[in-house]
């Protein structure tokens, strides 16, 4: 009974925070409400026995997404309005807008109703637990004992490989669009003191999450996000270096996740096994190898996303200068 | 059929609808991006509710893995969307 009251309160705060986030007219306020929404969601994941997801939500969903959005609000003195530079809308459009808003609201409500109906229909049909049973039966051969890690890195490794490719594509898109935004002011003594403690703890935490992911909640995603958070803290404190390598090394780190994953898959293919079908004796070590590379790539990607573009890299610039000199000499 | 499962799944449906409404109605690009993130969170709530199988039982790990993947893809898509949104006013000023 008391649990039902807790559920009710939790769901009420989730829905009302979502409502407040979406109806606020101030961009900064709506971003902060969104971060609160993410943290309350993390509590809900804990309640529904999904600690892996709770960790990822708190670190990525609420933490890094919030940091990205807040940085975007900071960089944008006026609201990001599409077509803001064009002439103001004609009068008389107000009536149409009210009708349009009502129509969109009704259609969204209809979508919620349809979804709920489909779900209740699915719940009332006979439950089938074929997949969960198959996972728990094969868990021993997967090389890890955390079922979520087993699904991500073994049973459905294909999905995770493609997800890392999505991450790489997104960061390449960001590189193509813009240079990194200018850094922050140097931190005051209190924040600077905190940074000295926080950054090593975050790095240690990332290593722990990576290692523990094999048999308890954790893994490459949570570890990568924690590592990226260390870089974000350094940047917020006004440090010029965020731990990202320069030049070609940066490119290697960015591509390491997809690269190592593919290399392992292709090597197994050459040895006559299916693509990413690990031999059970090696599965644990191969998963740790892939996860280490994936963690570095995820951390670099998330941090580059926070920087907002390609960092001013001394290595690449020096290489380009050298090339230019060689060309002029010819 | 569990009360908890149904309650959380229904809340997920409501959050999806709220997010969609916000994404369609907001004038500010940044708030549209936030709204799409809220909509995604609603889908995650739905999936995790479906995975829940009662207090003593281990939940289904497959939707959990899907949601983990979803969270990481959502943050990278958000970062790309923000980079595009940053470029948009500059491109319009060039016209």
Image (spheres, coloured by chain):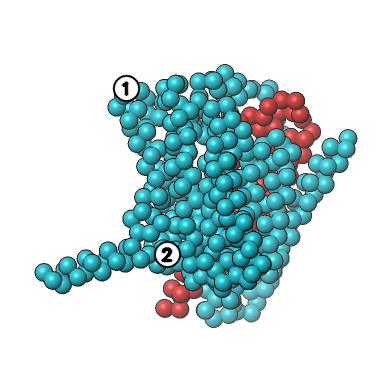
Colour chain A appears in: cyan
Tell me the quadrant of the picture where the N terminus of chain A can be found.
top right
Upstream in the sequence, badge 2 or badge 1? 1
Q: Residue at x 58, y 55 (%)?
A: A199
Q: Residue drawn 52% across and 41% down?
A: A220
Residue A115 % position (x, y): 67, 41
- Give the percent coordinates (x, y) of residue A282: 43, 25
**Discs 2, 1: same chain:** yes
Q: Considering depth in this image, is A109 or A292 the residue closer to the camera? A: A292
Mark 2 chain = A
Q: Residue A272 got which mark?
A: 1
The residue most toward the right is A1
Residue that sits furthest to the top in the current view: A137
Classify mark 1: helix, strand or loop: loop
Determine whether, in the image, residue B55 is placed left or right of residue B71: right
Tell me the residue that label 2 is attached to: A311
Count the labels in the image.
2
Give the chain letter at badge 1.
A
Residue A327 location in percent, x, y? 16, 68
In the image, is A228 to the left or to the right of A330? Answer: right
* Location of residue A219 by image quarter: top right
Secondary structure, mark 2, is: loop
Return the residue nearer the eye: A19 or A157: A157
In the depicted view, which residue is nearer to us: A204 or A84?
Answer: A204
Chain drawn in red: B
Can residue A240 be seen here? The reply is yes
Q: Dot 1 surroundings within 10 Å: few (below 14), some, or many (20 or more)?
A: few
Label 2: how many Cα within 10 Å (few below 14, some 14–19, many 20+): some
Q: Position of residue A45 (x, y in %)?
A: 69, 41
Identity of the residue drawn at 63% across and 63% down: A193
The quadrant of the picture occupied by the C terminus of chain A is: bottom left
């Amino acid at each position: 009974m008391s649990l039902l009251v807790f559920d009710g309160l939790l769901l009420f705060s989730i829905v009302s925070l979502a409502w407040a986030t979406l109806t606020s007219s101030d961009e900064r306020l709506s971003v902060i409400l969104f971060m609160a929404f993410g943290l309350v969601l993390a509590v809900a994941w804990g309640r529904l026995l999904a600690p892996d997801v709770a960790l990822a939500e708190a670190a990525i969903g609420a933490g890094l997404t919030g940091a990205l959005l807040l940085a975007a609000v900071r960089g944008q003195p006026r609201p990001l309005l599409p077509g803001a530079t064009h002439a103001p809308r004609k009068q008389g459009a107000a009536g149409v807008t009210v009708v349009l808003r009502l129509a969109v609201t009704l259609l969204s409500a209809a979508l919620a109703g349809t979804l709920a109906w489909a779900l209740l229909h699915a719940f009332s049909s006979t439950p089938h637990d074929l997949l969960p049973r198959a996972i728990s039966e094969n868990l021993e051969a997967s090389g890890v004992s955390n079922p979520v890690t087993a699904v991500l890195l073994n049973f459905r490794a294909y999905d995770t490989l493609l997800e890392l490719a999505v991450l790489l594509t997104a960061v390449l898109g960001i590189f193509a669009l813009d240079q990194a935004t200018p850094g922050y002011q140097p931190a005051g003594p209190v924040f600077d003191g905190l940074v000295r403690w926080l950054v090593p703890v975050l790095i240690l935490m990332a290593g722990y999450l990576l290692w523990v992911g094999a048999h308890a909640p954790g893994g490459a995603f949570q570890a990568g996000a924690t590592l990226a958070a260390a870089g974000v803290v350094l940047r917020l404190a006004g440090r010029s270096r965020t731990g990202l390598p320069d030049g070609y090394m940066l490119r290697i780190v960015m591509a390491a996740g997809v690269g190592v994953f593919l290399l392992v898959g292709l090597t197994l293919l050459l040895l006559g096994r299916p693509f990413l079908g690990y031999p059970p004796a090696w599965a644990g070590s191969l998963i740790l190898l892939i996860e280490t590379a994936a963690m570095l790539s995820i951390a670099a990607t998330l941090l580059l996303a926070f920087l907002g573009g390609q960092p001013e890299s001394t290595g690449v610039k020096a290489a380009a200068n050298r090339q230019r000199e060689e060309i002029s000499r010819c | 059929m569990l009360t908890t499962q149904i309650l959380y799944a229904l809340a997920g449906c409501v959050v999806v609808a709220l997010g969609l409404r916000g994404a369609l109605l907001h004038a500010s690009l940044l708030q549209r991006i936030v709204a799409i993130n809220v909509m995604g969170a609603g889908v995650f709530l739905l999936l995790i509710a479906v995975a829940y199988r009662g207090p003593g039982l281990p939940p289904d790990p497959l939707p959990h893995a899907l949601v983990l993947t979803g969270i990481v893809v959502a943050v990278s898509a958000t970062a790309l969307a923000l980079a595009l949104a940053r470029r948009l006013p500059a491109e319009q000023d060039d016209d």
